[in-house]
Amino acid sequence: MKLYLILPMLLWCLISSAQKYNFEKEYKSIEPKVIDWRRDFHQNPELSNREFNTAEKIASHLKSLGIEVQTGVAKTGVVGILKGNKNGKVIALRADIDALPVTERNDLPFKSTVKSEFLGQEVGVMHACGHDTHTAILMGVAEILSKNRDKIKGTIKFIFQPAEEGPPPGEEGGALLMVKEGVLKNPDVDVIFGLHINSATPVGVIRYKSEGLMAAVQRFVIQVEGKQTHGSQPWKGIDPILISAKIIDGLQTIISREVDLTNEAAVISVGKITSGVRFNIIPESAEMIGTIRTLDYNMQKQITERMKEMVPDIAKAYGGTATIEIKSNTDITFNNPELVVKMLPTLKRVAGQDNVQIQKAVTGGEDFSYFQNEVPGFFFFLGGMTPGNTASFPHHTPDFSIDENGMILGVKALTEMSLDFLNN
Ligand SMILES: [Zn+2]
Ligand SMILES: [Zn+2]
């Protein structure tokens, strides 16, 4: 074929693939709405398991679109079920809706001045993790898809999840409770997609990683028992502070000498030590609290087993005793490799080839992992940083902010991933 024929054809292919569903008009008209919703949520943030007004706004939006709505799921969660005109598979799209006990320091017209009570303290409340953008993005996706049922072969579940940051102590909540209450059943979900806006990723960019993207978070408590004595006569007692030091040292050798760090990263951190009352008493006991972060279940098993062996053994070597208790806070945000391969062309089409980049593993946690324990899932990062602004502030801080121009790509990605998955 002649070159003058090939070039226009190539160009045509490029244009038609960039606009597979011809939603350019829809995206243009939804963007200002998404920004307005986000500003409203930003100005009126609510803490985990207390997202009452947020849930009401979401539910009334979904109802206005003719979507079947369930409320009060896992306390304040909202679930929308949208059936396409043809039968097919079921996918779920998830947005988290809660804010944090942080006092906002940004100078914005829609800055949060909300105050609330958290653990008996008065605190400022702020969408300092960007969940306001997730909620607004998913409301936009729901609006576009609800007006295009003829293009949907199957069912889409919109999951608006409370308490991602963790329910208050003593309460259940978040993704784990949603799963427990059967959010992935009836109709049974085949795959789930979710995203997180990121203040260090430029607007227009999507970052992803196959397999372990975000870490499993475990919390451990170590109790060390020694024998109390005068500070001047250590030979008459057993020093639990010295034993604690040896234990910390030993635990770090699990990371540095025993696990294969070329596979995935892993972290053990002791965050708190409590022991003793004054300078001249060797106390009776010590307590240490810390966290374990892993991105691979085999490594998690190896690390926790070795900690359970090592802690009592080290204490015994110095004449004391020690116990360790390990509890899971979240599991590994594990992206199903086949699903990632399947959905990458969609992400590259909506964002542009060069704007879909590989993300390094993150040692922070995300409770989206509980959905991924049940069904294959794909969770990725969406750029929310003004390009060039490398001084952007991290999530969970009073100065955290998001460039709203990044949100529309989230709408495009989730809309087209849904249609591509269901129609192929
Ligand atoms: Zn967060
Ligand atoms: Zn978050």
Image (cartoon, rainbow, N blue to C red):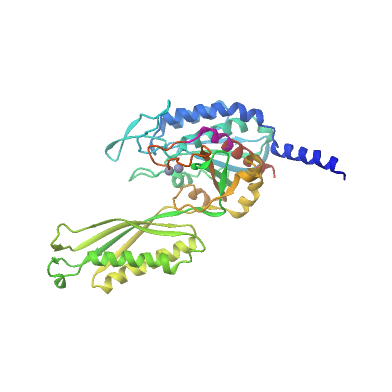
Q: Residue at x 57, y 44 (%)?
A: 206
Q: Residue at x 56, y 49 (%)?
A: 208
Q: Is residue 144 visible?
A: yes
Magenta region, residue range: 402-409
User: In the rendered image, which quarter contains the C terminus?
Assistant: top right
Q: Is residue 414 magenta?
A: no
| Viewer-side residue, 244 vs 71 | 244
Ligand 1's quadrant: top left
Above or below, 134 against 293 in this view is above
Give the side of residue 364 with respect to residue 80, left or right.
left
The image shows residue 68 at horizontal and vertical percentages of: 56, 32
Q: Is residue 407 magenta?
A: yes
The image shows residue 4 at horizontal and vertical percentages of: 85, 40
The image shows residue 25 at horizontal and vertical percentages of: 65, 28
User: In the rendered image, which quarter contains the N terminus?
Assistant: top right
Above or below, 408 against 183 in this view is above
The image shows residue 189 at horizontal and vertical percentages of: 58, 45
Q: Quadrant of residue 42?
A: top left
Q: Main secondary structure of the magenta part?
A: helix
Above or below, 419 against 223 in this view is above
